[in-house]
Image (cartoon, helix red, strand yellow):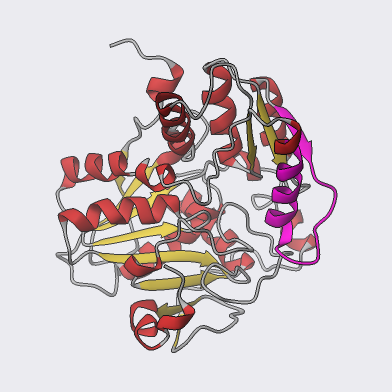
């Protein structure tokens, strides 16, 4: 069947990783970077098509969204393909490749100049977005951080995985807006109530109640806010990796598995790789790789970048430290989040 560019979204491969010599359980990777522009093409497609179907997005109305990465590309692809003017509000962290792609797709790009006193770059972008919505009252805002269509977009991903390998025992995913992991895990949990859900975050991200460090170098995962699409109730374990660890594991993913990806994928790979040596060999581990390495080719794939930021290249930490409670972490640490939730219910947003 001949497809359009919008139809192509979601037709991504599932592979089994080589894994490490000590790995026991098989690790499968859903290569979401093989969507036209990345994983969040799924989200853009789901949100925009549903908004048009329901009448929220009027014919020819502009679309305005806040993004510094792959969602911007998905919105530009789907929105402009369907005849809508697309405005992307971003910040100085946007890489030149993404900026170039957005321009080529016909999006109008608005770069905020500085962070406010709270909320990091995400809040600064949202403030600019609110101002633009006042100027364009007919505009549609996809609201990736809270729109329920974001996690719903990943039900199709979960179903396709189960069709290929059967029920999954452990799912590992990076968390930014919360949509991909929580949407995939929510659907997989309907099929296997014993599913273990492992979230991967950046050290210095406030998603799981650490102190926010807006100057962290990792992109694509982590957040300065607690997005409404993070379903804390289904998450069993959280891992935090620092910049050096995330970047080195990204390079290892390319070297060992031949997958040229971004640091979200690299961090997920590190955790899934470690888990494979610590669980029953009969268990099936699924990890979701969201991002290609293209936008990082001048940064984390260059030794000069490591030198500039005083990071040690080729240093693989494969021994995460277990912590008993939420605390600011400086190196790869993990927490039994399910257990922590039981004694800290008042601290968790559902």
Residue drawn 43% across and 44% down?
150
Q: Name the foreground residue: 79 vs 324.
A: 79
Does 316 appear above or below 335?
A: above
Question: In the figure, 167 relative to 86: above or below?
Answer: below
Residue 24 left/right relative to 219 = left
Q: In the figure, is residue 232 to the left or right of 60?
A: left
The stretch drawn in magenta includes residue 231: no
Residue 115: say if magenta: yes
Query: Which residue does the image show at 22% across and 64% down from the upper left?
Result: 195
Front in this rendered view, residue 99 or 137? 137
Task: Please indicate whether residue 139 sits to the left or right of residue 292 in the image.
Answer: right
Looking at the image, can residue 229 be seen? yes
137 relative to 182, above or below: above
Percent position (x, y) of residue 147?
Answer: 47, 46
Give how far across and how far down residue 250 sits, in percent.
53, 55
Can you give x and y, in whole percent of width and height, for residue 137 in the image?
A: 67, 31
Quadrant for the C terminus, please: bottom left
Residue range in magenta is 108-132
Residue 93 higher or lower than 205, as above or below: above
Q: Nearer the viewer, residue 103 or 28?
A: 103
Quadrant in the picture for the N terminus: top left
Front residue of 44/335: it is 44
Res 17 seen here: no
Across and down, in percent, residue 86 comes to 65, 26
């Amino acid at each position: 069947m001949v497809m359009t560019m919008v139809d192509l979204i979601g037709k991504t491969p599932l592979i089994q990783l080589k894994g490490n010599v000590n790995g026991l359980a098989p690790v499968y990777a859903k290569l979401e970077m093989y969507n036209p522009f990345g994983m969040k093409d799924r989200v853009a497609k789901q949100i925009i098509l549903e908004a048009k179907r329901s009448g929220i997005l009027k014919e020819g109305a502009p679309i305005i969204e806040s993004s510094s990465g792959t969602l911007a590309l998905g919105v530009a692809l789907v929105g402009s393909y369907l005849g809508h003017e697309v405005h992307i509000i971003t910040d100085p962290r946007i890489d030149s490749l993404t900026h170039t792609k957005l321009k080529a797709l016909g999006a109008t790009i608005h770069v905020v100049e500085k962070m406010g006193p709270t909320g990091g770059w995400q809040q600064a972008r949202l403030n600019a977005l609110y101002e633009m919505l006042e100027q364009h009252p007919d505009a549609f805002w996809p609201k990736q951080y809270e729109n329920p269509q974001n996690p719903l977009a990943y039900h199709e991903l979960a179903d396709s995985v189960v069709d290929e390998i059967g029920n999954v025992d452990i799912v590992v995913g990076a968390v930014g807006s919360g949509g991909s992991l929580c949407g995939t895990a929510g659907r997989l949990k309907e099929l296997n109530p014993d599913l273990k859900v492992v979230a991967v975050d950046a050290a210095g991200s406030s998603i799981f109640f650490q102190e926010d460090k807006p100057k962290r170098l990792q992109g694509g995962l982590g957040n300065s806010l607690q997005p409404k699409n993070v379903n804390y109730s289904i998450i069993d374990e959280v891992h935090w990796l620092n910049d050096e660890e995330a970047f080195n594991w990204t390079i290892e993913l390319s070297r060992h598995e031949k997958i040229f990806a971004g640091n979200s994928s690299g961090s997920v790979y590190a955790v899934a790789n470690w888990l494979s040596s610590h669980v029953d060999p009969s268990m099936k581990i699924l990890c979701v790789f969201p991002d290609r390495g293209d936008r990082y080719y001048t940064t984390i794939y260059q030794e000069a970048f490591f030198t500039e930021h005083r990071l040690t290249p080729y240093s693989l930490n494969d021994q995460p430290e277990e912590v008993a409670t939420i605390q600011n972490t400086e190196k790869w640490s993990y927490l039994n989040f399910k257990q922590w939730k039981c004694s800290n219910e008042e601290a968790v947003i559902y």
